Image: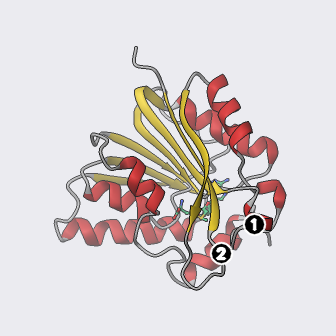
Amino acid sequence: MSPADATHWDARYAAGSPWGTEPNRTVREAVTGLTPGRARDVAAGDGRHALWLAAAGWQVDALDFSPTAVDRGRASTALLDGEGALPGSVHWEVADATVARPEPLAYDLVLHSYLHLPGESALAALRLSASGVAPGGVFLLVGHDESNLEHGHGGPQDPDVLTAVEPITRALTAAGLVVERAEVVERPVDGAPRPALDTVVVARRPAS
Ligand SMILES: C[S@@+](CC[C@H](N)C(=O)[O-])C[C@H]1O[C@@H](n2cnc3c(N)ncnc32)[C@H](O)[C@@H]1O
């Protein structure tokens, strides 16, 4: 069983919520200030970002290839919706990010948060996601950077699946997006001797 296998992730989600319910701080910073619209959360896990976005008024399509993660996400969505805590919405789908085709040019925000895939699979997922970004819309990627392995903390230990600024910016540019931010940022981790190092890329499709 490997991280490329949905059953690996099912087992993790069956044991609880691995990432908690708070959004990643880079996601919070990058999204706060955007006008809520339609969002696509790719490899959404059990929904910490999808639910946070819906609470801020976004209409979210969330997908993950782990049925257990999606079940958990649906249950949290129903709970919060029943409490009147979601001015927006989350529509959940079990889908593989390397083949699931978004509605073209439809999303004001497309999010990849810690989706780690090898080589051509990573590029395929990026290209598909970019195709869903609406004119004026934003693509946001946060991932464990390739430098994290030697100089950071945590994250996947397989160098083939780590993210890096250069290939991501190249793929997004080729897909017609304009990269507005591309850098490696430090993320403090409680109890860790040094921060984690994250790739952060923000790109936008020019308004037509
Ligand atoms: C580290 S978790 C991140 C979850 C979420 N984005 C977050 O930041 O909380 C990685 C997620 O990617 C999902 N995943 C991995 N490969 C995938 C694929 N090919 N298609 C869809 N989801 C995938 C896993 O099931 C897992 O939920």
Residue at point 56% right, 76% down? Answer: 189
Residues packed near mark 1 inside 10 Å, few (<14), some (14 to 19) or many (20 plus) = few
The front one of 60 and 179 is 179
Q: Is residue 83 left or right of residue 20?
A: left
Task: Locate residue 77, reporting x and y percent.
Answer: 33, 65
Residues packed near mark 2 inside 10 Å, few (<14), some (14 to 19) or many (20 plus) = some
The front one of 103 and 166 is 166
Three-letter code for the amino acid on which mark 1 is drawn: His
Residue 39, image quadrant: top left
Relative vertical location of residue 55 with respect to residue 59 in this rendering, above or below: below
Kindly state the secondary structure of the residue where label 2 is placed: loop
Residue 79, image quadrant: bottom left
Task: Locate residue 206, reporting x and y percent.
Answer: 45, 20
Instruction: Write down the residue under mark 1.
Output: 151
Relative vertical location of residue 21 with respect to residue 118 in this rendering, above or below: below
Residue 15, image quadrant: bottom right
Tell me, yes or no, whether the two marked residues, 2 and 1, touch with CB atoms within 8 Å. Answer: yes
Instruction: Write down the residue under mark 2.
Output: 194
Q: Is residue 176 left or right of residue 37?
A: right
Residue at point 45% right, 55% down? Answer: 27
Q: Is residue 171 left or right of residue 15?
A: right
Three-letter code for the amino acid on which mark 2 is drawn: Arg
